[in-house]
Structure formats: C-alpha cells, structure tokens
C-alpha cells in the first residue's frame, strides 16, 4: 500500500513537472503554430539560474526558504525575458516559414542548453534546497519528500491561473481570438505581435519555473535536464490535444503515473508505455484527448 | 562551353578522383588535418563523414525532396548498427547474411512505421516518428532482452569479419568501402529523384492537394519515400558500424536525428551533393573543434573564446540558427544555380500546412 501511495504521489509530481513545460508549449502552439524545441533549454536555464543564485549566496548544502523563493521568482523572470528576446530577435523574421521556424527553435534549444555547459561545465551539480523540502511527510505509511507536494501545488496553481488568464482577462481573450483568426484580430486594431511576444515569454517563464522545481525534484542540475523532459512534455501536449490546457493537465497526470509505475516494476517499461501511448492516441484520436483541432 | 559549365562538369570529377586517390597521398595539409592526409586518423575522419553523408542523402530524400519532416530517422541508422552486430554475436550468422538481414529488417521496419505514422501529417507525424524512435532508443539503452549491451553497447566480433576490414592498417580499405557505398547511394538517389516517382515527391512537397487532384495517392508515394529513406539510413548505419567497430546507444538516439537534420540543412535540403558535403563538414567540425580547443594557438585566446570551442554542440546550435536565418538553402544554395535555389525557396517560402489552425481553451 505504502509503495502505491509513494508511486502515485511521485508520479503526480512528475506529471506536474511535465505540465509546467507542456502548458507553455501548448499555449505557444495554440496561438503561434510554433512547435517550440527551445522549451527544454528554457527549463534548463530556469534550473541553472536558481542554482547559480543559491550557490552564490550560500555555501551550505541546503538553502534558506527565502533564498529559494527569491531564486524561484528571479529564475522565472530571467527566463521569461530570455524567451521574449528569442521571440523578437529570432522567431519573428520566420513567421511565414513554419518548417524553418521549427528548425530555428531546434538550433536555439541546442545553443542555449549547451551554453550552460560552456559557462558552468557539463557535469551535474547538486542543487541546494531548503531542508524542509527534502524532508518527508508520511502519507498512509509512505514517506514522501515535501518537494513533491510543492510541485503538485505549483502545477495546480498554474493550471488555475492560466485558465483564469485565458477565460477572464482581456489579454487572454486576445490570445484566444488570435489563435482562431489572426488576421481578423489584427484588423480590429489589436497588436498581435505583442500578444505573440507575451505568450512566448509567459510560456518560457513557466518552463523556467518548471526548471527550478525540476532541479528540486531531481536534487541536481545538468545541461541536459531540460531536453530529457522536453520529449515527455511534447508527448503530454500531443496526447492532451494541442492548444488545450486542461487536456495537457489530464495527459500530464496519466503520463506521469504511467511512467512512474512502469519504471518501478521494470527499468524500461515506463518510458516505453508512454511512447506507445502517444502512438496509440495519435492513431485513434489524432487531435488528442481534449484537443479541438480538425 | 562557357567557363562555368566546364567547372560544373569537371569539378565533381576532380573531387572524386582526389577522394579515391587520397589513401595513397601522403602530402600534409597543415592546421586542417594532423599529419599526412593518408594517416589512419584522417582517413577514418573522412570515412565516418561519408557514412553520415549516406544518412544525410537518405534523410534528404524524405525531407528535402518530399517535404516530410521526420524526427525518427536515427532508429533506422541504429538498426543498421545494431542488427548486424547482434546477428554476428548472438546468432553467429555469416557476415553477408547478417548484413542482408539488417538491410531487409531496417527497410521493413521503415515500411511498417511509415505505414502507421503517415496516417498523420505535419507536427503529428514528427511526433509519432519521434515516439517510435524514442521507444527503440529506450529498448536499446535499457538492454531489454539482454541483446544490446545497454549503455555500454556491443563490439563487433572481429574474427567474423574478413581480414581486409580489420585493424588500423586496413583503414584505407574501409575508407574506400565507405566512399564506394556513398557513390552507389548517391547514384541511386539521383536515379530516384529524376524518376517519375521523384517528380511526384516534389509535387507532394509543393502541393499535396494538387497531387491528390491528379488522381495519385500521396500516401503511397510518401510511404515509398519513407521506406527507401529508412532502408538507405540502415545502409549508412552498417557502414558506420564497420568504421567504428561497435554499436552504442548514441547511434540510435534523437540527438543523431537532429545531427542528420543539421547536416542536411548545412548542405542544403533538396540538393544532392549538398547534404553529403554538409555531413562531412559536420563530422569534421565535431572532431576538429575539440582538437583546436586544446591547441596552443587557442590556449592564448581569452577564456570566453576558448570555452565555447570545447563544446561543439554549442557552436553547431549557433551555426544552425545563423544558417536558418540567413542561408536557408545551405552550401548548395550558396554555390548552385537557379534550380536548387528554386527548390530551396519552395521548401522554405511557403506556409506549409503543418497543422490546421486551432484554438486555445
């Protein structure tokens, strides 16, 4: 029983991490039709920015709560700004050439994640976090690290925040309208370019936030921390349905749990089930679980 | 004949003769290559580049000519690396049956995966191929069934190879082998893209709907391109296996697909010699950048120049971005005539139906 509880909570935390990446990917694809391969690099930069801030201010193996929260906020903002610069400087010239846009995000992803290796060397570094995050809470006999709960809470907050943003705010309305018909929104005198930059920065910021939590989840940072998770985040987005935030959340839960349980019983089954799930969903229901496409 | 067409006819011949004669040329090319040109190290460097050239030709058939973006081609390359090794080691098959088995199995694998994946298109197709390749990489990397050697990989049992293939002294034989296969695959590809099917492929890349209107089934032609491309990628994997003497999970991961894509982009998608040149250049830079980074000349440079040189992937990422932004037609586009330019433009200039417009909820 305690094993099942532990696997369930860890699987949900893993799903929560995928969701933080996938929600931004989905939002960006929904509005801009861009499959953003640079998203993993944003995740990596979130992790490294937080790691750098914490290790610069403390030499201990654990961080203070204030230091961790500050790092969380700064990393999110830094990566959001980075994403905004990428969108303005590199993506905007290519909006009429979608294949090349995919390729340029691939190049950006490669260069940006390797840049962390250039600056901080390629090897993995331990990530100091507040002691209460690595301590465990006992739930039904299972000892679960507290950062798992924090990750799940953060993902729920992001889900609610994003649904609120899209459905209740003026900017969210522009984003949704822009996704339906870009030219029409432009004709109404609304600056769609600005909405693109905003959405890309928002998605990037969420990936950065996910990176900080990911570093806490794994307990260390390395230059490929983002690209490893990116593949699963892509799978979450496609299974959930491109452009559907709730779909991404649902798919993230399913995939996080499937992977965690699968990998517990054999070393490979979890990863294998997940990719199989993607193939099956795409072939039976190409628009994904909750997708609105086609 | 004007000067340009003389150049266009004789330059490839001259390059080919030079490449064929290279193992007998002991002249040195300072800075670019260490030692005489026919040293085993230099020959190996070029020969592996040729093997990637075959993979790039295969990929280009699908991406450059048919306009289909696959993220799973490393799977077929990996099949060419792993299947013969397993057949030789585990089942102690003779060399030729092992190779034949690998080519047939790799092509069949491409046929099956293509038949399933091509039911989707655009982004979805990219994702399905990525998923299949990732599934293969997981099975290989985690050593499912105990056949693949996991992260360590497998070495080829050298006793089962003919003597002329084994050892550093025979690097020139392997070099010629690699070059010969490259030439054959090049000619096959040339024949294919100028065949009626090749015209249909280009038609699909330009406008799939219109091809359908003409009464042809784009699905079957795309499947043909995918299957041939997968089979040729398997051949590339086999050549790579002979050159490196072993199979490791690096030969099957998504990083390799990205590398092949990069080679094609560097060389110019939709041209024939471009991707080959791109592949050789990519492999050359990948090996040489790290060597240059350790050289005395570079040691004198400031830290912020030296460090990136140690990380070829970072440099490739930058090259990738710059090429896509400023030279989307790659090397071939920079040198070749109007035809390739036109191809490159159509590949990049059109808003392809990657996915139907959706919404966000």
Image: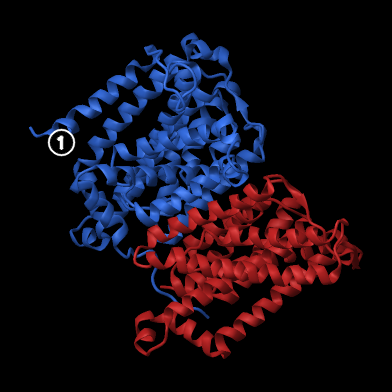
Chain colours: A red, B blue
Q: Name the one closer to the observer, A231 or A90.
A: A90
Q: Name the one closer to the observer, B210 or B352.
A: B352
Q: Where residue B274 appears, x then y in whole percent?
A: 32, 40
Residue shown at 68% from the left, 53% from the top: A270
Q: Residue furthest left?
A: B1
Q: Name the one closer to the observer, A216 or B146.
A: A216
Residue shown at 35% from the left, 40% from the top: B275
Q: Count up the numbered dots.
A: 1
Q: Is residue B72 visible from the viewing direction of this image?
A: yes
Q: Name the one closer to the observer, A269 or A52.
A: A52
- Please, is residue B26 above or below residue B101 in the view? above
Residue shown at 75% from the left, 62% from the top: A53
Quarter of the picture holding the N terminus of chain A: bottom right
Q: Where residue A63 appears, x then y in whole percent?
A: 85, 63
Q: Chain of mark 1?
A: B
| Disc 1 element | helix
Q: Residues within 10 Å of mark 1 (few under 14, many from 20)?
A: few
- Please, is residue B18 above or below residue A74 in the view? above
Q: Where residue A62 appears, x then y in whole percent?
A: 87, 60
Q: Is residue B121 visible from the viewing direction of this image?
A: no
Residue B249, by quadrant, is top right
Q: Where residue B218 appears, x then y in whole percent?
A: 28, 55
- Please, is residue B9 above or below residue A143 in the view? above
Left or right of residue B91: residue B127 = left
Left or right of residue A199: residue B10 = left
Residue shown at 37% from the left, 17% from the top: B22
- Please, is residue B138 above or below residue B166 in the view? below
Quarter of the picture holding the C terminus of chain A: bottom left
Left or right of residue A286: residue B141 = right
Q: Which residue is mark 1?
A: B4
């Amino acid at each position: 029983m305690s094993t099942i509880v532990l696997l369930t909570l860890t699987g949900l935390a893993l799903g929560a991490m995928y969701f933080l990446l996938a929600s931004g990917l989905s939002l960006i694809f929904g509005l801009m039709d861009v499959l953003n391969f640079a998203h993993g690099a944003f995740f990596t930069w979130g992790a490294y920015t937080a790691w750098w801030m914490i290790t610069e201010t403390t030499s201990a193996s654990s961080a203070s709560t204030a230091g961790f929260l500050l790092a969380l906020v700064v990393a999110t903002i830094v990566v959001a700004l980075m994403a905004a610069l990428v969108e303005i400087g590199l993506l905007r010239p290519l909006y009429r050439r979608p294949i090349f846009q995919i390729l340029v995000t691939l190049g950006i992803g490669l260069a940006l994640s390797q840049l962390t290796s250039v600056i901080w060397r390629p090897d993995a570094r331990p990530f100091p976090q507040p002691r209460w995050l690595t301590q465990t809470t006992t739930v039904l006999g299972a000892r679960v690290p507290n950062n798992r709960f924090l990750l799940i809470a953060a993902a729920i907050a992001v889900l609610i925040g994003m649904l609120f943003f899209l459905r209740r705010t003026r900017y969210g309305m522009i984003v949704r309208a822009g996704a339906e018909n870009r030219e029409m929104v432009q004709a109404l005198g609304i600056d769609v370019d600005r909405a693109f930059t905003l959405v890309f920065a928002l998605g990037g910021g969420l990936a950065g936030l996910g990176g900080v939590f990911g570093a806490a989840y794994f307990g260390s940072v390395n230059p490929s921390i983002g690209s490893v998770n990116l593949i699963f985040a892509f799978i979450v987005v496609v299974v959930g349905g491109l452009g559907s935030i709730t779909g991404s959340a649902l798919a993230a839960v399913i995939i996080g749990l499937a992977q965690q349980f699968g990998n517990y019983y054999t070393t490979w089954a979890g990863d294998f089930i997940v990719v199989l799930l993607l193939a099956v969903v795409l072939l039976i229901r190409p628009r994904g679980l909750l997708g609105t496409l086609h | 004949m004007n000067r340009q067409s003389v150049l266009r006819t004789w330059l490839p011949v001259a390059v080919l003769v030079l490449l064929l004669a290279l193992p007998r040329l002991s002249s040195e090319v300072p800075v670019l290559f260490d030692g005489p040109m026919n040293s085993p190290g230099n020959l190996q460097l070029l020969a592996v580049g040729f093997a990637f050239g075959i993979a790039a030709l295969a990929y280009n058939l699908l991406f450059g000519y048919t306009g289909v973006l696959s993220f799973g081609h490393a799977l077929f390359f990996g099949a060419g690396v792993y299947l013969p090794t397993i057949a030789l080691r585990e089942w102690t098959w003779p060399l030729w049956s092992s190779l034949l088995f690998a080519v047939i199995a790799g092509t069949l694998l491409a046929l099956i995966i293509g038949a399933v994946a091509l039911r989707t298109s655009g982004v979805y197709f990219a994702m399905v191929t990525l998923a299949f390749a990732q599934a293969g990489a997981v099975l290989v990397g985690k050593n499912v069934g105990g056949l693949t050697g996991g992260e360590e990989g497998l070495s080829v049992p050298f006793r089962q190879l003919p003597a002329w293939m084994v050892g550093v002294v025979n690097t020139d034989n392997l070099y010629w082998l690699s070059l010969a296969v490259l030439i054959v695959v090049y000619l096959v590809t040339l024949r294919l893209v100028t065949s009626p099917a090749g015209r249909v492929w280009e038609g699909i890349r330009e406008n799939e709907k219109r091809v359908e209107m003409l009464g042809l089934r784009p699905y079957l032609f795309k499947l043909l391109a995918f299957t041939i491309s997968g089979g040729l990628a398997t051949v590339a994997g086999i050549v790579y296996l002979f050159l490196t003497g072993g199979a490791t999970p690096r030969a099957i991961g998504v990083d390799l697909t990205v590398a092949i894509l990069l080679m094609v982009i560097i060389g110019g998608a939709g041209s024939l010699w471009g991707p080959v040149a791109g592949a050789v250049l990519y492999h050359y830079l990948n090996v040489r950048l790290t060597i240059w980074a350790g050289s005395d000349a570079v040691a004198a440079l400031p830290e912020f120049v030296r460090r990136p040189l140690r990380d070829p992937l970072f440099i490739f990422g930058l090259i990738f971005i710059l090429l896509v932004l400023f030279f989307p037609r790659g090397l071939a586009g920079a040198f070749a005539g109007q035809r390739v330019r036109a191809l490159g433009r159509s590949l990049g200039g059109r808003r392809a139906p990657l996915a139907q417009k959706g919404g966000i909820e």
